[in-house]
Structures are given as C-alpha cells and as structure tokens.
Image (cartoon, rainbow, N blue to C red):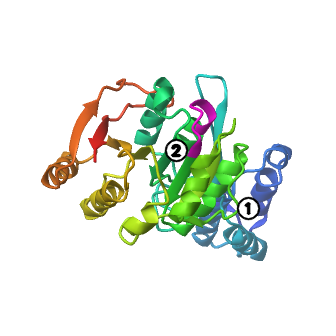
C-alpha cells in the first residue's frame, strides 16, 4: 500500500506525512527505534521516492545522513547466575569477531569449565591459578567468586581483550593489582604474590604472549593450577600453546608441577586430534575429565565440549 500510494502521489507531501506519523509518532518517541531500524526505514523510503516522479525531500536525505553518523552499540551487558545465587556481570561484544579478535565474547568451553570448577572447588581453594587466554574473564571471575583461590592470574595477549578484561574484573567488585596491564613478574615478585593469604583473592591481569615469554619470566608465576578454555581452535596456535606448557614444566624449579585443565569445544575434530597428537609427541600425558553433557549457563544447543587434564 505504501508503494502504491507513493507511486500515485503527485508530490512528496504523502511521504512527509508518513515520516511524521512514524518517526515522530508518540510511541516512537517513548520507545525510540534503533539506529539500524531507522537506517533501514529511511533507506527504503528513499528508494520508494526515487522510483516515483515526486520531488526529493532534502530533509529525508539529511535524516539518513545523521543516522549513518550514529554508532551502533558494539557491546552489551550479560549476567550469568551462579549456583550460589551470585552472578557474573560482563560487558561483551555483540559480534563474534570484533577488533580483530574473537576474545571479546564468552565461548561455550569457558562456560563448561566454569561449571566444572564450581563442582570441584577444592582444586582451586587457597591456590595460585594461572588462566591462559582468559578472554573477557567469565571462567576466572566465576572461580574467584566461588572457589576461594589465593591468587588468580588472568592472562591474554590482545590489547583490546586485556582492556575489556580489566573492566569486567572491576565490574564484578575485584581490585586489580596496581599494574593493570601486568607483565609476567620476576621470581621475587612471584613469591610476594603467593606469600599472603587473604579472604578475597589477589587478582592480576597479565599480558602473556605464549611465543615470546621466557622460562625465566615464568619462574615468577609459581602457579599451582593452570586452566584454559577454547584455546584449541586453530592449528596455527597449537604449537605455541604446547610450547607454553613445556616452558611452564621446565620453569618450575623445585616446585611441584602445576595441575593443568584445558576445556575445548570440538568444532573441527581434526584440529582437536592434532592437539592430542602434538601432546603425545612431546611427552605430555593427558586424560579426559568426566563432565556433564549439559551446562547450566547455556539455554540453546549444547556443543561438544571436553576437558582434558594434562600432566606436564
């Protein structure tokens, strides 16, 4: 009906009336449509107008230009309810890939690993935890809120991810160590990190590049437990990950080797099997950890997620 009316209109007055009754309608003022909706609406109206002999409306083109200047929100806030009744609040990207990284959203394996951790709090209680590829922090924050670790070291290498990670940690009420973009510490500093016990965990964010970090730097971490989620998704990074695990193994000095748990969503079986084969090749033993087939934090289709315990 709109198209027929526009084609029959001798001038642009009808179009102006439509704009007034929709864009300026009281309900639209009370519940303003998104920029995306307004952009699509105005674009369609312009197409209809240009297909008729009606005179163009400068106001219409100006409105579209203004809408195009508006930035769509690229982030949203999500609340994940924990079994304790507490929740993890996160600022997440609305796109799977944003800023050249996939680390600005929470992936399924992170949810499964968090659920397993909450069911096995003794693994983390009063211990120093290092998380590889923390992303925006769901798993680590959930562990900090429920499992009472002594120290939790979040780590990632992408600057956008590290910035968002720090914001999410603070959003959930934790105080970061003075250097938010903390780099791997020296051994003396590492002893200081583990030397004190407190009711709330000591929380650190580390910029950690698996390929460039040295064994000497890792001596300062002194982690009791190492975890990671959804880091086995690209054959190109598998060798770097395994190299990182080997450095952790050889840098432990006289300390007991850390317990290592890696959760993976099996999207490509060949990639997952490559990871297992490379572990075998360098002599890192592994075993499958039984995990529930469903996750309380997921309400749609449950992916195929496994958790491996590695012995480095």
- Residue furthest front as drawn: 254
Q: Nearer the viewer, residue 279 or 115?
A: 279
Residue 61 drawn in magenta: no
Residue 212, percent across and down? 39, 72
Report the side of 287 relative to 299 (left or right): left
Q: Is residue 221 above or below residue 144?
A: below
Q: Is residue 130 left or right of residue 305?
A: right
Q: Is residue 65 above or below residue 18?
A: below
- Residue in the foreground of this view, choosing between 28 and 258: 258
Instruction: Say left or right for 110 vs 251.
Output: right
Residue in the picture at 33% in, 43% down: 264
Tell me the quarter of the picture where residue 165 sits.
bottom right
Q: Is residue 111 visible?
A: yes
Circle 2 sits on which residue?
128
The range drawn in magenta is 144-151
For mark 2, give the secondary structure: strand
Q: Which residue is mark 1?
A: 15
Q: Quadrant of residue 269?
A: top left
Residue 188, percent across and down? Answer: 56, 62
Q: Residue at x 69, y 43 (%)?
A: 172
Q: Position of residue 211 (x, y in %)?
A: 35, 69
Residue closer to the observer: 61 or 94: 94
Between the residue at mark 1 and the residue at mark 2, the CA separation in whole angstroms equals: 66 Å
* Vertical relation: 85 (above or below) 203: above
Earlier-in-chain disc, 1 versus 2: 1
Residue 146 is inside the magenta segment: yes
Q: Are marks 1 and 2 in contact (CB under 8 Å)?
A: no
């Amino acid at each position: 009906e709109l198209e027929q009316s526009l084609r029959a209109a001798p001038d642009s007055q009808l179009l102006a009336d439509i704009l007034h009754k929709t864009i300026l309608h009281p309900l639209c003022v009370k519940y303003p449509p998104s920029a995306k909706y307004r952009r699509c609406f105005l674009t369609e109206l312009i197409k209809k107008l240009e297909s008729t002999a009606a005179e163009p409306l400068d106001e219409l083109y100006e409105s579209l230009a203004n809408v195009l200047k508006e930035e769509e929100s690229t982030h949203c806030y999500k609340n994940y309810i924990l079994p304790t009744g507490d929740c993890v609040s996160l600022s997440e990207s609305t796109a799977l890939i944003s800023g050249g990284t996939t680390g600005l959203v929470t992936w399924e394996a992170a949810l499964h690993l968090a659920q397993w951790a909450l069911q096995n709090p003794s693994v983390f209680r009063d211990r120093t935890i290092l998380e590889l590829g923390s992303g925006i922090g769901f798993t680590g924050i959930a562990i900090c809120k429920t499992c009472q670790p002594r120290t939790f070291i979040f780590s990632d290498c992408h600057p956008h991810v590290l910035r968002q990670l720090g914001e999410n940690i603070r959003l959930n009420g934790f105080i970061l160590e003075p250097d938010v973009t903390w780099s791997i510490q020296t051994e003396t500093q590492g002893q200081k990190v583990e030397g004190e016990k407190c009711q709330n965990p000591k929380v650190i964010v580390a910029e950690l590049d698996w390929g460039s970090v040295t064994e000497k730097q890792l001596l300062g971490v002194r982690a009791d437990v190492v975890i990671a989620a959804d880091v086995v998704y690209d054959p190109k990074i598998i060798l770097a990950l395994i190299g990182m695990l080997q450095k952790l193994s050889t840098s432990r000095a006289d300390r007991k080797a850390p317990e290592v748990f890696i959760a993976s969503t099996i999207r490509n079986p060949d990639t997952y099997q490559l990871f297992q084969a490379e572990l075998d090749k360098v002599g890192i033993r592994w075993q499958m950890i039984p995990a529930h087939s469903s996750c309380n934090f997921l309400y749609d289709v449950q992916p195929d997620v496994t958790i491996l315990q590695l012995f480095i």
